[in-house]
Amino acid sequence: MTPRGGATPQRETAHDGPGQAGTAGPALRLPSFDQRANLRQQVAETLRALLITGRMRPGHVYSAPKLAAEFGVSATPVREAMLDLVGEGLVEVVRNKGFRVTELDDHELDAIAELRGFIEIPVMGLVAERCVGPVATEVRRLRPLARRITKAAAGNDLVSYTEADNEFHTRFLALHGNDHVVSVIRDLRHRSRLYGLEALVAAGVLAQLSEEHEQMVDAALARDGAEMRRLMTRHIGHIRSTWAGRSGRPAATRTAAEATAGAAGPSPRG
């Protein structure tokens, strides 16, 4: 796992911290960072990736000084980075102990999936329908990134996968021209993916899901808004099931956005 910004190779340690007080927490694979001006951002990005991939577990309390020792930095940038994650709802402060990773319940997962569906499905459809000129040029530039996602999935590189996945979706949405859409969806993506991807890798599902990104590029270049909306409906549906580490829910609890998009036709297979 190598975060952006020039981190040195990772190391894995087994220790009592930074797990929950009085218990042996899960071992983390943490890098040592170089001393750069954006150290706080480097630490925050890596902690966020550890949360998304499930290596930092919901319910566990993590100590900023112990994390800092493993990063090879002072506690200040780690504490500041953790406070950034508090603001995103990914962790919460535990007085005199550290930071606890938050966990989403079923209602929150459904609410986030519904909100993402309301925004992303129609916006991506519009991007596809307006995919000409400079927009088409930028969509073509997303294909190498889509292939990088597939390569990371094949190599079980979960941190690189999540970083490339976030970049792909935010760059695609940015082609609509509304910065607020990008900001809101970036925040929702961070909040909804706290349960890990290891199970997806073990089941052979992650590589299959990664292929949907090139399908989105193809749909946009074909200016097929209906196909794009179907793809995004299925993609967002993974949040509530495989992405979130939960079993599928009954059809009656599908989000309104999924039901609306589904009315346009069956989702594609594969």
Image: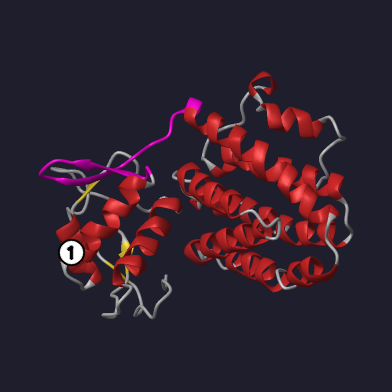
Label 1: few (<14), some (14–19) or many (≥20) C-alpha neighbours in 10 Å: few
Q: Amino acid at mark 1?
A: Thr
x, y percent for residue 155: 57, 68
Q: Which residues are magenta?
A: 89-107
Q: Is residue 14 visible?
A: no
Could you say which is closer to the camera, residue 201 or residue 164?
A: 164
| The N terminus, quarter of image | bottom left
Residue 3 magenta-drawn? Answer: no
Tell me what residue is drawn at x 42 percent, y 58 percent.
49
Residue occupied by mark 1? 76
Asked where in the image residue 90 lies, by quadrant, the reply is top left
Q: Is residue 108 visible?
A: yes
Q: Is residue 13 left or right of residue 240?
A: left
Asked where in the image residue 5 lies, by quadrant, the reply is bottom left
Tell me what residue is drawn at x 39 percent, y 52 percent.
51
Tell me what residue is drawn at x 75 percent, y 28 percent.
259
Tell me what residue is drawn at x 56 percent, y 30 percent.
110
Could you say which is closer to the camera, residue 131 or residue 164?
A: 131
